[in-house]
Image (tube, helix red, strand yellow):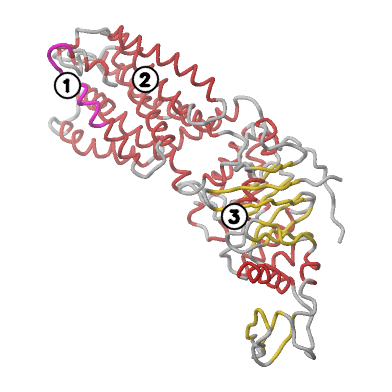
Amino acid sequence: MTVEMVDVQPREAVGASRTAGPLLALGRREARRIVLSPVYAVGFGLVFVTTGIGSFTEGALPTAEHVYEFIGLMLVMMGGLLTYLAAHLVTSSARRTNADRQLESSTMSSRSRGGALCLGVVFGPSAVAAGLLVVLAIIGSNAAFPDGSQRLAVVELVQIALLIVGGGVFGVMTATWLRFPGSLLLGFLVLGLGTPQMYQPTVGPVDTLPWFAPFVTGPGFAEDSWVNLGSQSWHTAYLVGLCCLAVCAVMLHRRVGRGRWLLVSAGVFAATAFFGWMQV
Amino acid sequence: MSPTVVVNDVTKRFARTQALAGVTVEVSAGVTGLLGPNGAGKTTLLRILATVLGPDSGSVRTLGLDPADARDRTRIRRSLGYLPQEPGFQRGFSVFEFVDYVAILKELTPARQRHDEVRRVIAAVDLTSVSGKRVRALSGGMRRRVALAAALLGDPQLLVLDEPTAGLDPEQRLRFRELVSQAGEGRAVLLSTHQTEDVAALCHHVVVLHEGLVLFRGSPSELAQRAEGHVWFAEDRDPSARIAWRTGDGSHRNLGDPPAGVVTVPPTLEDGYLLLVGARDEEAAA
């Protein structure tokens, strides 16, 4: 038997790249997967059926104020939770379907894949939400609100966008670290029940606790009794810090090169703690 | 010419199970078959060669590189295609989307070049007509071909295939055999299988693993020759046979030490394999 011998020196695979191109390409692909998740269609469909139709059918046609209120509430109340669910399901899909067996020998490391999923959250649902918030700002600037406080400030719109980013990266983080079937529900309960618990207006020495909840603190959403106790800008920075902490947690899952990410995480943690302290 | 893969005295243990107990194997260009019963350590060895697992002891050199080194591992992965046992597919992916997704994970860019490569490998496994279909809507054989297409991305120098024909019907198996044969031209292919016919048809070299040890290394004909003089037909099961079964024409094919005077027949690779593994099991039982 004759066997054709090959050169056994490794060569670069066809088109192989060492730049950030693959990470961005994967980020875009994950963004598409997250945005197209059926979770959004089901979740927002339910919100529309339960709240939207009712408010729209009260008058002959929905007013700009109706649309403004509906989009705003939908994004605030459901945006983060639904993005959490979609991001978790996309992150865990390879494990749930055994596809990870084929992917684990790929050139891109699990850390890069986690990073791409976080990028996907920014590229996908957050970009869509940002678009909706711009629409909201345009409607808000033209709508005639009887009560001026219903119009959301720019800082509140930014906080809403951060809720959606935060929900997504929290979903990536829980799916990365908690690799068991109940982790989706567990994270959902933490977000869905823990956040409202923290957000309750309280009295006494812990009346600043709501400011530490990952939620919007503007007067459009919060109770007036405690909203003036802190700074909206610092709270926005605090939310950015929480998002970055979740991304760091995703990066820390892989053991190789963990030391560098521990340093980064320590820095992010310190900054987030500082922002949290400054906000109140 | 040096071999593509050199595995030297590799061991691997999972809790109380010794999966590999000092395996030494070389893989060169062409198709190398890896035979062995369930639990022999085939999948563990393949996962080590696919750089997914690291050995507890011993050394592995792939394409002259050390998979234990992170940079070398990345270089190996650029030249490696791996088809795991029972590959899974995420919901919602079409054939093109799945292979393209794996292509991104293999860091193939830019997009146009990557899409050309995806189309090339889909055509190589003859799935162009269904490239827009959901993977989960395809038959088992077609899904294996999708996974093979993903493994072929980037024209790898080493292809590691873990039981690619398990569970396929005869027609699909023959189709897959043709694809593996084509894939083995000009590259090293390591094929793990239970199907001795596949090894006989495809492989220039065969390794038999049993309980984490290499029982045999050589050509398929050499493995078959192990049973030379040990296969005979009789009307009934011969008491001296280690293994015997009734064939379609009613006679019994006996494997073992033949009684004096019987006429032996030329053995097959399967005969050689069964005698080899059977003898080992008898030794272990004794």
Which residue position holds label 2? A242
In magenta, the rendered stretch is A192-205
Q: Any mark on residue B129, and which?
A: 3
Secondary structure under tag 3 reads helix
Q: The disc labelled 1 sits on which kind of residue?
A: Gln
Which chain's residue wears label 1? A
Considering only vertical position in the picture, is B235 above or below B90? below
Query: From where the camera sits, is residue B64 visible?
Result: yes
- Prevailing SS of the magenta stretch: helix
- Establish whether labels 3 and 2 are both on one chain: no
Query: Going 64% across and 88% down the picture, which residue do you hit?
Result: B237
- The span from disc 2 to disc 1 (Cα, nearest Å) is 20 Å
Secondary structure under tag 1 reads loop
Image location (x, y in percent) of residue B102: 58, 41
Query: From where the camera sits, is residue A142 visible?
Result: no
- The span from disc 1 to disc 3 (Cα, nearest Å) is 58 Å
| Mark 2 crowdedness (10 Å alpha carbons): few <14, some 14-19, many ≥20 | many
Which residue position holds label 1? A200
Image location (x, y in percent) of residue A205: 16, 11
| Mark 1 crowdedness (10 Å alpha carbons): few <14, some 14-19, many ≥20 | some
Query: Which quadrant of the figure has residue B53?
Result: top right
- The span from disc 3 to disc 2 (Cα, nearest Å) is 47 Å
Q: Is residue B104 found left or right of B159 in the rendered image?
A: left
Q: Is residue A167 found left or right of A90 in the rendered image?
A: left
Q: The disc labelled 3 sits on which kind of residue?
A: Ser
Q: Nearer the viewer, residue B267 or B179?
A: B267
Query: Which quadrant of the figure has residue B225?
Result: bottom right
